[in-house]
Amino acid sequence: MSARPQAEPTHGGAAVAARDPRLDGLRGLAILLVMLYHTTHYGMVRTKLEAALTIVPSVGWSGVDLFFVLSGFLITGILLGARDGTSYYRVFYARRVLRIFPLYYATLAFFLLVVPQLPFFAAVDHFWNPGASREQFWYWLFLSNVQAALSGAWHHQTLAISWSLAIEEHFYLLWPLVVRRASERRLLQICAVAIGAALLLRAALVAGGASPLAAYTLTPCRLDILATGAAIAILARRAGGLEAMARAARAVLPVGLALFVALQAWIRLGQPEATGYQAITRQVLMLNNDPLMQTLGFSLLCAVYGALLVWVLTAPAASWRARCFERKWLRSFGRYSYAMYLFHFFVAILAVNVFTPGNHPQQYVLAQLCFWLLAIGVSYALARASWLLLEAPALRLKRFFPYRV
């Protein structure tokens, strides 16, 4: 495995030569987790079989953490490979702009400028949550995570997910400055400090009674997962590359996953019994706001997803895990994951008006499967259209900004 990653990240991932197909497979897993999380009707669960169907979706929010570790890994590898070349900053930032801005700002324009003018959407109040501040500049400036942390609430139903894009944009803005000036040894030290500091900051916010959204969405609080990916990229450049970390990854992955599952079960068992669709759904969707999850749980995800990344990329070519993450359908989800991430919540809101599982309480399993097929299928179709019409043309402009080593 080459120590220098050949693909560029974001929720969609850039199409460049010699990309490892398994990275797209990991992105595909990440976007599936997020979409299942947002499109599952938890409040309808009545039987053990139905409860089993929601186990994976209930932790789907962690798919964003998988995106983060991929971003840390890929961006750091790209920067380390290019930092001695000419036009280091100009090329990196230009390529990031071409990947992120066209689709992001087109999405903002649609929801913030076009939707308010369309009578069809009046019934959902233009997708703003009741009582929300309708200040738009937070979104235009990639500060929606700060707005959520300060107010303790999500303001826009469909643009709330932009908090993770804001964190990545902050990382893209600042990390190149650090990589350019620090040795690899110093970078590893910085990653270690970031991992520890993020945990301490989250613990301080939780202990101080801050809004749960602060520990969840503020950039300094999530630097540990980005730093985990960055540290793996740095270590991959040393003798032995990723293979040198494979044994540790094989040990850490099952242990970390078991501890995370146990923590999730402990939190759920400790919750008071909720009744009613809204109460049950809210309880499940708020699991990532639990103090234990926001401290120990988030740190466990660093270990789990960092180990998963190494475990997948070091898999022998013909192994089952290599074949699993090289599946064409999963890689296709990864390829279009950026647009799917931005579109899926909007699609789910509209889809529930077409087919509502709540109208079929006696056939919940079948109804939920049909809703997943509808919401995820439409999101995928729109994402492919976005790729063809907007993203791919913008990415072709990257040829004017090649990395020169």
Image: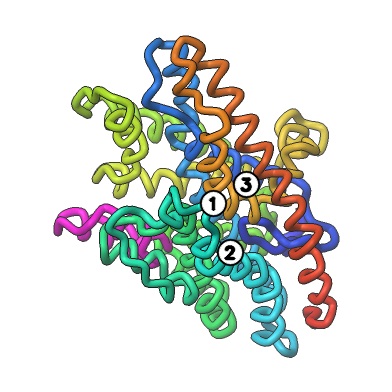
- Residue toward you, 329 or 403: 329
- Stretch in magenta: 197-223
Image coordinates of residue 241 in percent, x first then y, are 68, 56
For residue 70, above or below residue 366: below
Identify the residue at the far left of this view: 208
**Label 2, label 3: how far apart the Cα atoms are:** 38 Å
Image coordinates of residue 262 in percent, x first then y, are 35, 28
Instruction: Give me the residue at 47% from left, 65% from top.
Output: 167
Looking at the rendered structure, the number of numbered marks drawn on it comes to 3
Tag 3: amino acid? Val
Colouring of the image: rainbow
Tell me the tag on residue 361: none
**Callout 1 touching callout 3 (CB < 8 Å):** no
For residue 48, above or below residue 122: above
Q: Is residue 131 left or right of residue 4?
A: left
In the picture, the quarter occupied by the C terminus is: bottom right
Q: Nearer the viewer, mark 1 or mark 3?
A: 1
For residue 264, above or below residue 347: above
Tag 1: amino acid? Phe
- Label 2 crowding class (10 Å Cα cut-off): few <14, some 14-19, many 20+? few
Residue at the spot of label 2: 110
For residue 29, above or below residue 233: above
Tell me the tag on residue 310: 3
Image coordinates of residue 384 in percent, x first then y, are 76, 50
Q: Secondary structure at mark 1?
A: helix
